[in-house]
């Protein structure tokens, strides 16, 4: 499993421990984590949730009157760091 997948799985596990079952999805350039938020969450739980998602590269909250509140986080996959990023046709 790529490093992003391991980080995302750890974030999802910590969210589940707070009582927010999370979904993890692998994408081409990142791994995403989503969890539905209940109408009320204690201040202590909010602090824990924010501490957890702060480990992601990006995170946010999507709130709509139709679907409630969804917490999301993204962990980017590593970008190649070699000089051959452009491939064989991109040589100097």
Image (tube, rainbow, N blue to C red):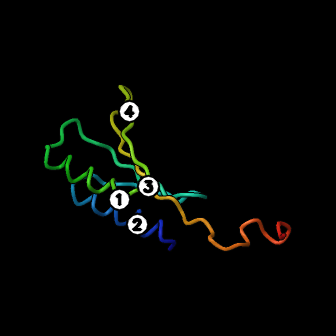
Mark nearer the N terminus (2 vs 1): 2
Q: Secondary structure at mark 1?
A: loop
Closer mark to the observer between disc 2 and disc 4: 2
Q: Mark 3–mark 1 contact, CB under 8 Å?
A: no
> Mark 2 and mark 3: span between their CA atoms?
10 Å
Q: Position of residue 68 (x, y in %)?
A: 33, 33
Mark nearer the N terminus (1 vs 4): 1
Q: Mark 2–mark 1 contact, CB under 8 Å?
A: yes
Closer mark to the observer between disc 2 and disc 3: 3
> Mark 2 and mark 1: span between their CA atoms?
8 Å
In the picture shown, does residue 12 fall above or below 91?
Answer: above
Which residue in the protein does label 2 denote? 7
Which residue in the protein does label 3 denote? 57
Nearest the eye: 60 or 84: 84
Which residue in the protein does label 1 denote? 55
> Mark 3 and mark 1: span between their CA atoms?
7 Å
> Residue drawn at (35%, 44%), measured in percent from left and top?
71
Residue that lies at the very extreme toward the top in this rendered image: 65
Q: Mark 3–mark 4 contact, CB under 8 Å?
A: no
> Residue drawn at (38%, 27%), measured in percent from left and top?
66
């Amino acid at each position: 499993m790529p490093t992003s997948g391991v980080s995302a799985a750890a974030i999802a596990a910590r969210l589940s421990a707070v009582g927010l079952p999370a979904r993890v999805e692998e994408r081409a350039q990142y791994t995403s984590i989503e969890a539905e938020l209940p109408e009320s969450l204690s201040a202590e739980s909010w602090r824990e949730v924010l501490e957890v998602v702060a480990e992601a590269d990006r995170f946010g909250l999507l709130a709509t009157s139709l679907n409630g509140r969804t917490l999301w986080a993204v962990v980017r996959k590593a970008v190649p760091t070699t000089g051959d990023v452009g491939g064989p046709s991109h040589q100097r």
